[in-house]
Image (cartoon, helix red, strand yellow):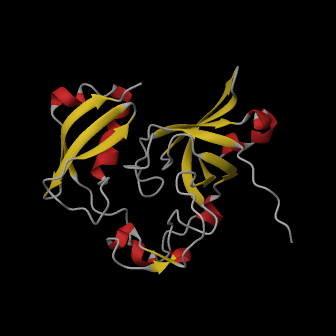
Amino acid sequence: MTLPPMKSIARIRSDFPTKFGIPRQSGLVQALRSTVVFEPEFRNPDALRGLEGFDYIWLIWQFSASVREGWSPTVRPPRLGGNVRMGVFATRSPFRPNPIGLSSVRLEQIELHPELGPLLHVTGADLMDGTPILDIKPYVPYADSHPRAAGGFSGPDGGPILEVRVPEELLSRVPLDKREALLGVLSHDPRPPYQQDPDRVYGLDFAGLNIRFSVQDQVLTVRALQPLPK
């Protein structure tokens, strides 16, 4: 059977220009705001009729920054420190036979833009800016929610939460409407789990800013903050 070609129906606009620092799963940082912008071919408001009745939607998307030739049956999940191999189909690794991701996000608003057509304003997305969206489906609570389900090696929650310390002088440089999201991203420890050097300074690009930070004893301290070059 010949599979039909996949089309990008939309792209997401988020505050992450690179992969580093993006939450490991959707919904971990609900304060993150993003916008789904449809491709010209799909800017028909009729395609969204009835979607306003749902609180959450599924975004099916492509790992556009992780496409590679070939595939491996096992991968090294960051949750296990990058030292243990698990079957690729037991993980959410981007390195898959088909580089497809799945995210549950909260639908905050549907806007009808005069030039861009319908826009979906969402929160809690874990996608890099410009990521292609392949499909959108409504989240149906009675079928999609399984709160007592076993989570395997991923554990019962999103991992440990760090204490975040930002000098007031640096925090004042962050736009007011971005502060809660940034603090949430930092609290979930953007570092790869296998990097635990307390003397290392990391750089995270977010919302037009480069944030430099270090982590010691479960405390993340922001050391510097500068605007990204335009």
Q: Is residue 121 left or right of residue 83?
A: right
Which residue is found at the position 55% from the left and 79% from the top?
A: 73
Q: Of residues 1 and 125, which is closer to you in this image? A: 1
| Quadrant where the C terminus is found in the figure | top left
Percent x, y of residue 15: 44, 37
Percent x, y of residue 129: 51, 40
| Quadrant where the N terminus is found in the figure | bottom right
Which residue is found at the position 20% from the left and 47% from the top?
A: 201
Q: How many marks?
A: 0
Above or below — where is 172 with respect to 49?
above
- Quadrant in which residue 79 is drawn: bottom left
Which residue extends farthest front? 69
Q: Is residue 97 left or right of residue 195?
A: right
Q: Of residues 133 and 118, which is closer to you in this image? A: 133
Percent x, y of residue 171: 23, 30
Q: Is residue 99 left or right of residue 186?
A: right
- Quadrant in which residue 100 is drawn: bottom right
Percent x, y of residue 61: 62, 53
